[in-house]
Amino acid sequence: MGNYIRAAGLSGFEDLVRSYGKDPIDILGKVGILPSMINEPDSLIDYDRYLNLLELAGLICNEECFGLKLAANQNIRTIGLIGVYISRQNSVLESLHVAQKYIDMHAEGFTFYANKLPNQLSELNILSQNAQNIDRPQEAQLAMCLMRNVIKDLIGPTWRPEKIKLKQNPTLESQQLLTKMFDCEVEFDTKKNALYFCTDLLARKPYHFNDDLVNQLILQQLENESTKSISNDTFLIESAMKMLLATGDCSIANVALCVGQHQKKVQRQLREQGTTYRELLEDVRKKEAIRIISTASIDLTDVALQLGYAELSIFSRQFKIWFGMTPTEWKNKSKRPVKNTLLV
């Protein structure tokens, strides 16, 4: 089983590479990533290919801070509707607990944990889980910048870290850029990649920008799938289901929290659309099964886990009920599309 990252993690990649006068399509091809994949935010990209892409792009563009610049405009919106779920917890501490639990829905290749220190500071350590088990400067920069921006979204626009530590030891020019963009003291050539902030901030209620965030995500996802003919509300519920499937906790209560509605309102909206939560969940699983198998070279066990199934055998049986063949049989067939009205 491999690790994957949502293509949203490459948001802005093409424009950034072009700003250096280089060809992003060529760089994507060198690491085996199809250009079409990065235009679909929920596409899954092999995490080690993603890391190779960041490092190669940094070399080709001759930019030590490529990962930092790529992440500069990424924030809680980048991680999709789960970002709304994270922001709607009762405290920043609870938000970080949820983020820690569900971050692998966005990127399975890195994780983080927070420790309270005795000097009224908390330390957030970012750990990589790449297959080569080596330090990747661009990965560290991107992950650190994304987590900084997510925390800033939770605490408020004027917040900044107390300090950041990076294992990387870049040139003086790059050190100055990193310090400027992180807007705090940065220690280099350390033993960990970590971010420090005041512990008392953990008790705060997350900053309220939820309605704007939901509206932006609706527009963003409708633009990505502009051919959808279903209502905006149902589409948003479907999107929340997609995000929560891999957690194994895709309950109607969690979906309702993601879309900012009461559970009963979600049920009522689905009734008005002539469906139920259970029926829509099965429809979403059908469509996601075909989409993932069709657009990425992912091990079928990983596909099953992404869809919320504990075992490949359970997923295979259900897939055969849906389509009359197993996932392996479907995958090995010619490229004829499966005839299914759900996929219109």
Image (tube, grey):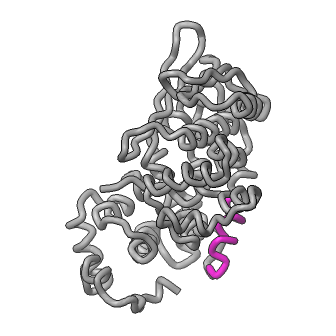
Q: Can residue 189 be seen in this snapshot?
A: yes
Magenta-drawn segment: 217-228
Q: Where is residue 284 in the image (x, y as percent from the top left)?
A: 45, 71
- Give the residue displayed 30% in from the left and 67% down from the top: 300
- Give the residue displayed 67% in from the left and 20% down from the top: 162
- Give the residue displayed 74% in from the left and 32% down from the top: 173
Quarter in which the N terminus is drawn? bottom left
Q: Where is residue 328 in the image (x, y as percent from the top left)?
A: 26, 77
Q: Looking at the image, which is closer to me, 269 or 83?
A: 83
**Residue found at the very far top of the displayed protein:** 119
Q: Looking at the image, which is closer to me, 29 or 335?
A: 29
- Give the residue displayed 57% in from the left and 73% down from the top: 36
**Residue found at the very far left of the displayed protein:** 313
Name the image quarter holding residue 86.
top right
Name the image quarter holding residue 268.
bottom right
Q: Is residue 121 magenta?
A: no
Q: Looking at the image, which is closer to me, 6 or 237?
A: 6
Residue 97 vertical placement versus 301 (above, below): above
